Image (cartoon, grey):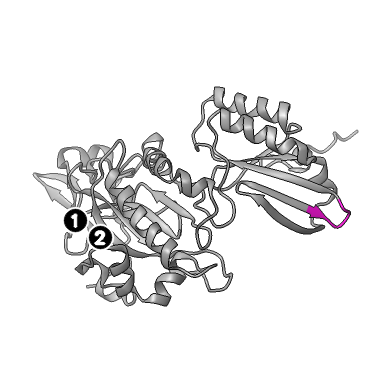
């Protein structure tokens, strides 16, 4: 008798049904309307008449097991045992009775988790891993986010911005944090320094050459040993060469700076998706609080809050008033680095990976 066929091992994301709140599961895809009774609280009403309240709290992206257990205990005691995390690392607790909302808010606030991040507010910053376990970090992304969100606490817990503000932080110019109304990225300003004594032992040179997006790296012989060389006229200081070849060190406490971009948007509501544009460069990478970064971001947010129309995103506001007026209102200096908006970048930055002879 033939053996029963071996069933495939489920190694992907588990089915979410068993983790859903019963009201969410019952009314999946059949919601009638929703409202925000106060910042950080959502109230959804299904076509069946069922209601559910969601309380959103800000949490850090990296948490120890004790914090996770604390949040789980709060969910069990105050929120019927169901939680979910948003893409921006906020935690949401769901309850089926309005009477449970305020005790839940009181408990979360007492434990140090601010309530907010909904509607026209500054939501939690989406960020990369930075020094924790990225192989190409120029700064501590988690630390910069912590310091900045401390300064933006009021903007998180109140809904007094013209529209939602999504912010991202990336620890290199590859920008894993993605597009954002305000994006804060590290910016290397010098080509990598090569330790030629180590390249032959550590680096797979063809992979390093292929990794460069502008074909600025080529094989070379230095002091009789196989190595690499960089065409500094082509190099855009992105740092992509460092992970496959650590001897090509690009991080530098003096020359690795922050760059701040605005106007990125993924959604197509009211206007099409857009790339963000550079508004500040050479901002000091100054841990552990990065005050210069907070200063620039606060200038942008204050000008946006005072001048933008209701429902305008940051990029839409800047496009309406014009970029010269944007720099006037924010008080940021306009420099030569702001001229190129990447149109024609294939020619003037030699951004193609095709090698030309």
Q: Position of residue 69 (x, y in %)?
A: 61, 24
Q: Left or right: 24 with respect to 49? A: left
Camera sees residue 9: no
Q: Position of residue 352 (x, y in %)?
A: 32, 69
- Disc 2: CA contacts within 10 A as few (<14), some (14-19) or many (>=20): many
Mark carried by residue 230: 1
Count of residue discs: 2
Q: Quadrant of residue 216?
A: bottom left
Q: As rendered, which of 236 and 246 lies closer to the eye?
A: 236
Residue that extends furthest to the top in the rendered view of this protein? 66
Which quarter of the image is occupied by the C terminus? bottom left
Q: As rendered, which of 64 and 320 lies closer to the eye?
A: 320
Question: Can residue 47 be found in the magenta stretch?
Answer: yes
Q: Secondary structure at mark 2?
A: loop
> Who's the residue at 91% across and 33% down the image?
1
Residue with the mark numbered 2: 236
> Who's the residue at 87% across and 53% down the image?
49
> Who's the residue at 15% across and 42% down the image?
196
Q: Left or right: 254 with respect to 19? A: left
- State the extent of the magenta-drawn residues as a range: 45-49
């Amino acid at each position: 008798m033939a053996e029963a066929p071996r069933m495939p091992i489920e190694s992907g994301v588990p089915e979410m049904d068993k983790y859903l709140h019963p009201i969410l599961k019952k009314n999946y895809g059949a919601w009638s309307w929703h409202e925000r009774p106060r910042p950080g609280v959502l109230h959804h009403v299904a076509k069946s008449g069922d209601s559910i309240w969601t309380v959103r709290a800000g949490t850090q992206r990296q948490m120890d097991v004790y914090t996770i257990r604390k949040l789980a205990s709060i969910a069990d005691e105050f929120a019927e045992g169901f939680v979910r995390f948003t893409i921006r690392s906020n935690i949401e607790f769901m309850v089926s009775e309005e009477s449970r909302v305020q005790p839940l808010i009181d408990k979360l606030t007492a434990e140090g988790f601010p309530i907010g991040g909904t509607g026209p507010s500054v939501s939690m910053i989406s960020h990369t891993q930075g020094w924790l376990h990225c192989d190409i970090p120029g700064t501590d992304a988690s630390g910069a986010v912590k310091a900045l969100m401390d300064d933006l606490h009021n903007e998180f817990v109140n809904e007094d911005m013209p529209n939602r503000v999504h912010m991202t932080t990336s620890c290199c110019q590859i920008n894993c944090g993605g597009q954002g109304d305000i994006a804060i990225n590290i910016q290397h300003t010098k080509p990598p320094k090569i330790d030629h004594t180590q390249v032959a032992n550590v680096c797979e040179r063809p992979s390093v050459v292929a990794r460069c997006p502008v074909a600025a790296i080529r094989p070379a012989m230095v002091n009789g040993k196989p190595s690499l060389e960089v065409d500094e006229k082509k190099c855009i200081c992105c740092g992509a060469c460092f992970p496959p070849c650590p001897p090509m060190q690009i991080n530098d406490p003096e020359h690795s700076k922050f760059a701040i971009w605005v106007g990125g948007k993924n959604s197509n509501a009211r206007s099409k998706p857009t790339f963000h544009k550079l508004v500040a460069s050479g901002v000091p990478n100054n841990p552990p609080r990065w005050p210069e970064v907070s200063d620039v971001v606060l200038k942008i947010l204050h000008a946006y809050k005072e001048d933008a129309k209701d429902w305008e995103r940051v990029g839409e506001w800047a496009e309406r008033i014009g970029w010269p007026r944007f720099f006037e209102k924010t008080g940021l200096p306009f420099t030569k680095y702001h001229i190129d908006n990447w149109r024609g970048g294939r020619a003037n930055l030699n951004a193609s990976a095709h090698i030309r002879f």
